[in-house]
Amino acid sequence: MKFRPRIPRSPWTRAGIALLFLGGVGVLLWLHGPDWASFKDAFGSVRWEWVAVAVGLNLLSIVARAAAWDTVIRSAMPPPRPSSPLVFAAFCVGLLANAVLPGRVGELARVAVLTRRLDSRNRPGAWPTLVGTVFAHRIFDLVPVGLLVVWVLITAKIPNWALASLWILLAIGFVLFVVAFATARHHHLTRLEGLGTVRRVLAMARRGLTVMREPGPASLAILFQCLGWTCQLFAVWTAMRAFHIYQPLPAAGLVLVLMNVATIIPLWPGNVGLMQVAVATPLSVQYGVNYGVGFAFGLGLQAIEASVGVGIGLVFLGREGLSFARLRQMPGAVSAEEEAKQSRERPAHEPARARVPG
């Protein structure tokens, strides 16, 4: 029997959950909140030309990271493959879903956008392969993240409470990359029939790691990921200028690392509040930035990133004919593949009882 989390239907239950969430954020702000006068002044003196530059750099980052995923897909899937514009649209829809919904449903949302354009009858294994490419795309993230963490450890003023976390993050990333590379070297197409849930998910991931056995495409994907993270680093640095925080580039690197650490586990949409504390605290303690200004910068930085991801995500969400209700109903990788299998076995004249979102 498969376990699926149930979303409460009662509006009173949903309202209670929302109030608990707001109460938790309120307690967090009360304990670690800023000086609200300096917080207000920071927003009143924002330099909008730097905000525009930060928005542009975030857009370039999304383009580069989508290009990395497109490279992985082209290595893992035989023709005909999804077009590059469609891959970019799916990536943006995934960013939107991750920004507004808890649970990282955006990773499956982007797969759903691609598969709804593919004929599941003639493309067996499309779902597991594409899910595997998402996993591989995340693995390639580990290269620029590892380089960024090493650079920050060498050049930035790191608070003691964050030092151990960065070393642990670096070690976990190294182990994951080595395991993924070893898995790709021993790659073979495993039949999914008869496998349990865990083994099936692992088989899906292995299919997407095909690109790691090809030096050319793998190097290109890593290059695009590094370009994307470089753009994001300079977006943080320019956003700091927008809030009159004139600190060196390593400080921006520290902010970028810690804000990603704070959002690894999506406790609520965007982890709003927690992310601002993670940004403002090291800037205040290590670099002497006023805590209220640092908190305002953290909120502004999250708004800049969300404006790009959510903005273009909404455009492509409408173009693909999807809705937020559809995003909430994204199927699991295994259940989606089972539905695709049923669709292939169903006679062409028989209507489908359920469909992959779209």
Image (cartoon, rainbow, N blue to C red):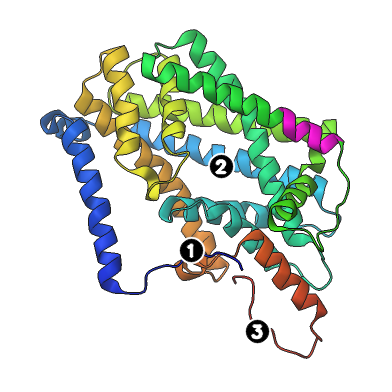
Horizontal side of 236 relative to 282 (left or right) equals right
| Element at label 1 | loop
Q: Which mark is residue 353?
A: 3
The residue under the point 78% across, 90% down is 349
Residue segment shown in magenta = 178-185
- What's the residue type where badge 3 is placed? Arg
Instruction: Please state which of residues 317 and 1 is positioned toward the viewer in this rendering.
Output: 1
- Single out the mark in the foreground, 3 or 1: 1
Residues packed near mark 1 inside 10 Å, few (<14), some (14 to 19) or many (20 plus): few
Which label is found at residue 62? 2
Question: Residue tagged by mark 1?
Answer: 5
Q: CA distance from mark 1 to mark 2?
A: 31 Å
Q: Is residue 305 magenta?
A: no
Where's residue 158, x and y in %? Answer: 40, 14
Q: Residue at point 63% right, 63% down?
A: 112
Question: Which of the labelled discs sits on residue 105, or is there none?
Answer: none
Question: Is residue 133 visible to the viewer in this orientation of the structure?
Answer: yes
- Residue 237 is left or right of residue 106, and the answer is left
Secondary structure type for disc 3: loop
Q: Are marks 3 and 1 in contact (CB under 8 Å)?
A: no
- Closer to the chain start, of discs 1 and 2, is 1
